[in-house]
Image (spheres, rainbow, N blue to C red):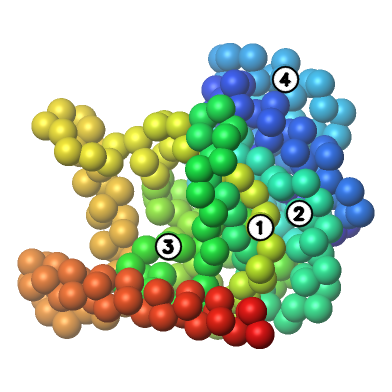
Amino acid sequence: MNFTIITPSLNYGRFIGDCLASVAEQVGVTLEHLVIDGGSTDDSAEVAARFPNVNWSQEPDKGMSDAINKGFERAQGDWVMWLNADDRLKPKALAKMLFSLDKSIADVVYGDWDFIDEGGHFLSHVRTPKWSRFIHVHHHCYVGSTAAFYRRATVIGEGHRLREDFRYVMDGEFYARLDTAGKRFEHVPVTVADFRMHGMNASQRHLGKTRDMETVLAAERQHVESRSIRRAFGITLFEDPYLNGLVDGILWVVARFWKLVLKVGFHRWGNR
């Protein structure tokens, strides 16, 4: 089997039909689609029942990372990815990826993606540069989980899993840890998926200026996860967290500049 697609879901019935259809319509590959539902009370189960290719399971979980890890445990495909219930694959994306994956020696292979709005209309295109641990740790996680594929034999099969205590930047911690373990990353210029922006995305819903304490606490938790990645995998010069924060700001600017350099270099090389 070429692919395992894992979709964690909880009360996303209004979007999950698009997600399931985008997987069912893939051609030229063999795949399984595991939908791990945490106990939806909307019409998610009824929508999923319209897709006979879907392997639906519904049980309580400890959050999104736990649901994805359950999918990792059950995966049988040579390459594994997770596709959020509010996202969707591009037509023929998996066949295009398989052409590159069959030639790759990397453990994590990732492509590009488009942002779409709540109604599914195009917003912008994201073209990612080649892998850089420095940019990933000190600027932001720029490998889109909805466009990344993990070699089951060397990633999932070796027991690498998401940290279940991470709720927002679990992919960022996962990639930094895989890099530390010596796993190879490769970018291929394939637009894999549509990432839907609708205001309730886990990575976006708590951001913005507010004085609501619950929202502030949730946003700070997200920032703490990102800082933890920098402390564990990046450059840490001081014991004082405030001094490290000042250094983080400088490194963020440098990493952002380096990302632009890589993107421009890739674009010029790719057009030769």
Residue 47: mark in rendering: 4
Q: Nearer the viewer, mark 3 or mark 2?
A: 2
Label 2, secondary structure: give it: helix
What residue do we see at 69% from left, 31% from top? Answer: 18
* On-image quarter of the C terminus: bottom right
Q: Nearer the viewer, mark 4 or mark 2?
A: 2
**Label 1 amino acid?**
Thr
| First in sequence: mark 4 vs mark 2 | 4
Q: Which residue matches tag 3?
A: 141
Real-space CA distance between mark 1 and mark 4, rounded to the nearest whole angstrom: 26 Å
Q: Please tell me which residue lies in front, 44 or 89.
A: 89
Decide: few, some or many residues near mark 2? Use Cα within 10 Å; few <14, some 14-19, many ≥20.
many
**Label 4 amino acid?**
Val
**Label 3 amino acid?**
Cys
**Residue 199 visible somewhere in the drawing:** yes
| First in sequence: mark 1 vs mark 3 | 3
